Image (tube, coloured by chain):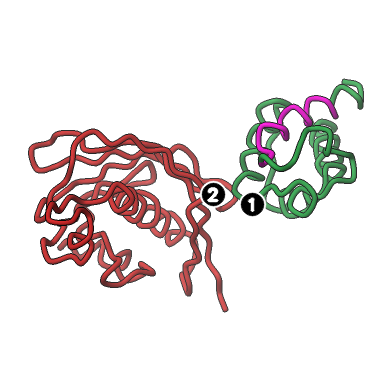
Chain colours: A red, B green
Amino acid sequence: MKESYDWILKQLPYSEPFLFVEEILNISDKGIEGSYRFSPDLDIYKGHFKNKPVTPGVILTECCAQIGLVCLGIYLLGKKSELENVAIGMSSSQMDFLIPVYPGEQVRVISELVYFRFQKLKCEVKMYNENDKLVCKGVLAGMIGVANE
Amino acid sequence: MLKEEKYQKLKDIIKIYLPEDVSVTDIAQDSHFMNDLNINSANLVDIVLDVEDAFDIRLENEDIEKMQTVNDAMAIIDAKLAEN
């Protein structure tokens, strides 16, 4: 793991079993690239689907949001202010799903900033599998700010 | 630009972001964006961004904080247009 992005991962308000960020590969003011491997041991595979495990679209969306919105948002905020508590909420998601992601697969999320104004962060996201095939894509937006309580 | 024209332009923007349980006719000058029109903070940002484009102005953080009602928005638009 690249040392320079460690502080972003530490600020993430998630933990197992709902952390879907493993590594940040690249980050700038304009976007981010990160990766995650879906462990075959995840509980969700027991029920989605019965005897035929496939990663749910909602989880792919969450993975895109955690990397594409939250990690990027922390980076953008962090450059300006000291982060005490990151307060976040997803406000909209529009996603298309093209191919399935099976247990054990590693995915790569690329997110490009549309805008970040008045605490609203909007991004265009794309997720690729290990064969660089587009898994899903869409537009995500959320509110992200710092609550210094 | 006439006041009526400005109000109409603003209403045309607001109506895009109204939830299904609020109709265009519910928009009044003293409507509170969040309490009366059920517009959330994320959609309020969209309204602000559309207002910036429509009126060719730029709003700051303190402007959006003051923008509670349709009247507030009108006043902010007037002030920004006067600066230009």
Location of the N terminus of chain B by quadrant is top right
Q: Which mark is residue B41?
A: 1
**A48 up-or-down from B51: above or below:** below
Location of the C terminus of chain B by quadrant is top right
Q: Residue A63, position in %: x, y?
A: 29, 53
**B7 up-or-down from A94: above or below:** above
**Nearest the camera: B18 or B73?**
B18
Image quadrant of residue A11? bottom left
> Residue at label 2?
A120
Q: Which residues are magenta?
A: B7-19
Q: Is residue B14 left or right of residue A55?
A: right
Callout 1 secondary element: helix
Q: Residue A105, position in %: x, y?
A: 11, 51
The disc labelled 1 sits on which kind of residue? Ser
Give the overall secondary structure of the magenta segment.
Answer: helix
Circle count = 2
Q: Residue furthest bottom?
A: A149
Q: Is residue A82 left or right of residue A133?
A: right
The answer to the question of whether label 1 and label 2 lie on touching residues, with beta carbons closer than 8 A, is yes
Q: Residues within 10 Å of mark 1 (few under 14, many from 20)?
A: some
Q: Residue A146, position in %: x, y?
A: 53, 66
Residue drawn at point x = 71 percent, y = 43 percent: B21
Q: Is residue A88 magenta?
A: no
**A143 up-or-down from B79: above or below:** below
Q: Residue A124, position in %: x, y?
A: 38, 37
Q: Residues within 10 Å of mark 2 (few under 14, many from 20)?
A: many
Residue drawn at point x = 49 percent, y = 51 percent: A142
Q: Residue furthest front?
A: A50
Instruction: Choose mark 1 or mark 2, whichever is in front.
Output: 1
Callout 2 secondary element: strand
Q: Chain under label 1?
A: B
